[in-house]
Image (cartoon, rainbow, N blue to C red):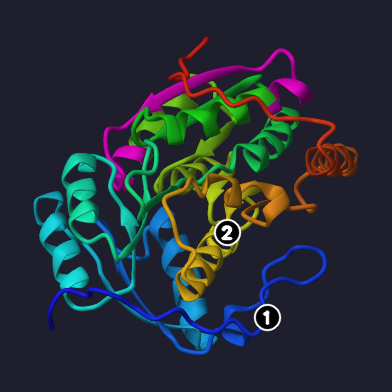
């Protein structure tokens, strides 16, 4: 197929309910939107799985036609973007960390195609919007559970890379832990990989040997180490408590549905433009939440977390955004 030059504006039957929450795009769209996902890792990987899950949900509602490519190397990413744009995909979703310049050049070459990309930088042109997992709020809440649980006053934290997207979650988690345990100290390490469970597990063991009795599992592998040593862990992005029974105290969850549904609606009614979708990951938009295992976390701590959650939602408490690299203080 040739380059997609135009697409007609879709008729919107209904857009928003009175509370301002977007209705299911399935009820709103007259035609299905053609959407492609491009992912550098498997769709099972925790961060990417949230995007894929939201797109699959939209497809199952009948809102979109969805195709995707996974395990796309950075060197192939530009080519795949162009192939999907040439093939008539109206919305292309992915993540362009590490290949910003090339991806933005592609978007500029296809001004009638909508691009929604995970990025550390600003939107560009008229058609490249950006998003990120702004779940620092539930990360703070999960930190409250961790701080209260630590008896050694040492919490271990294993991350992938020290980039703003990870740093802000870790720093918010640390702030939450200090609220319930002012004496807590942290061990911090970045393994230099988005997916290397053995390396993350090895790092976690080293922290436990140094006294950590609660682990922040930003990467896969950390909770496996926690199970083997009988210590508690905090989950990130997805809920893995079912895989690690009696181990996960709480998890900060990311929900991409508000972000994806907003983009689909914008493409459908012809209003898509370059904008920052980050706010749709905030708790008040339904883009983030915390889940707490009340069998593992004491009732008074659960109540404190719920009270802080309510304060976040009503705006009376604002979680600090700190993108600086967190460091060990023990």
At horizontal 59% and vertical 81% (from top left) the residue drawn is 12
Residue 154 occupies quadrant: top right
Residue nearest the observer in this picture, 292 or 63: 63
Q: How many marks?
A: 2
Q: Answer few, some or many: residues within 10 Å of disc 1's Cα (few below 14, many 20 plus, some between 14 and 19).
A: few
At horizontal 55% and vertical 64% (from top left) the residue drawn is 262
The percent position of residue 257, horizontal first and vertical second, equals: 56, 65
Task: Report the residue marked by disc 1.
Answer: 14
- Height in image: 306 above or below 206? below
Q: Residue furthest top?
A: 330
Left or right of 3, for residue 238: right
Task: Report the residue marked by disc 2.
Answer: 255
At horizontal 15% and vertical 50% (from top left) the residue drawn is 74
Residue 71 occupies quadrant: bottom left
Left or right of 132, for residue 281: right
> Is there any visible trace of residue 303 in the rendered image?
yes
Left or right of 110, for residue 24: right
**Viewer-side label of 1, 2:** 1
Q: What stretch is highlighted in magenta?
A: 176-200
Residue nearest the observer in this picture, 163 or 237: 163
Residue nearest the observer in this picture, 48 or 285: 285
Left or right of 315, for residue 224: left
- Height in image: 98 above or below 40? above
């Amino acid at each position: 197929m040739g380059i997609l030059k135009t697409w007609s504006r879709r008729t919107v039957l209904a857009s928003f309910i009175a509370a301002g929450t977007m209705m299911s795009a399935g009820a709103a769209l007259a035609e299905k939107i053609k959407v492609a996902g491009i992912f550098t890792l498997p769709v099972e990987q925790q961060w990417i799985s949230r995007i894929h899950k939201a797109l699959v949900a939209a497809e199952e509602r009948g809102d979109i036609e969805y195709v995707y490519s996974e395990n796309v190397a950075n060197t192939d990413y530009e080519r795949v973007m162009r192939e999907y744009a040439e093939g008539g995909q109206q919305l292309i979703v992915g993540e362009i960390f590490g290949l910003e310049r090339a991806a933005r050049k592609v978007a500029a070459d296809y001004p009638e195609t909508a691009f929604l990309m995970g990025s550390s930088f600003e939107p560009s042109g008229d058609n490249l919007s950006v998003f990120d997992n702004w779940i620092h709020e539930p990360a703070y809440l999960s930190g409250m559970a961790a701080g209260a649980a630590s008896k050694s006053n040492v919490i271990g934290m294993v991350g992938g890379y020290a980039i703003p997207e990870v740093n802000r979650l870790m720093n918010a988690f640390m702030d939450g832990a200090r609220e319930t345990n002012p004496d807590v100290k942290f061990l911090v390490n970045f393994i230099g990989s988005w997916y290397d469970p053995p390396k993350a597990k090895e790092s976690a063991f080293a922290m436990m040997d140094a006294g950590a009795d609660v682990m922040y599992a930003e990467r896969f592998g950390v909770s496996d180490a926690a199970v083997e040593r009988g210590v508690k862990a905090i989950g990130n992005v997805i809920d893995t408590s079912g895989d690690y029974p009696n181990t996960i105290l709480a998890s900060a969850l990311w929900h991409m549905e508000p972000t994806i549904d907003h983009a689909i609606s914008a493409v459908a009614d012809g209003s898509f433009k370059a904008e920052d979708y980050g706010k749709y990951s905030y708790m008040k938009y339904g883009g983030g939440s915390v889940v707490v295992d009340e069998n593992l976390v004491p009732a008074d701590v659960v109540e404190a977390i719920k009270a802080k959650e309510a304060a976040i939602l009503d705006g009376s408490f604002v979680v600090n955004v700190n993108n600086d690299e967190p460091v060990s203080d023990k």
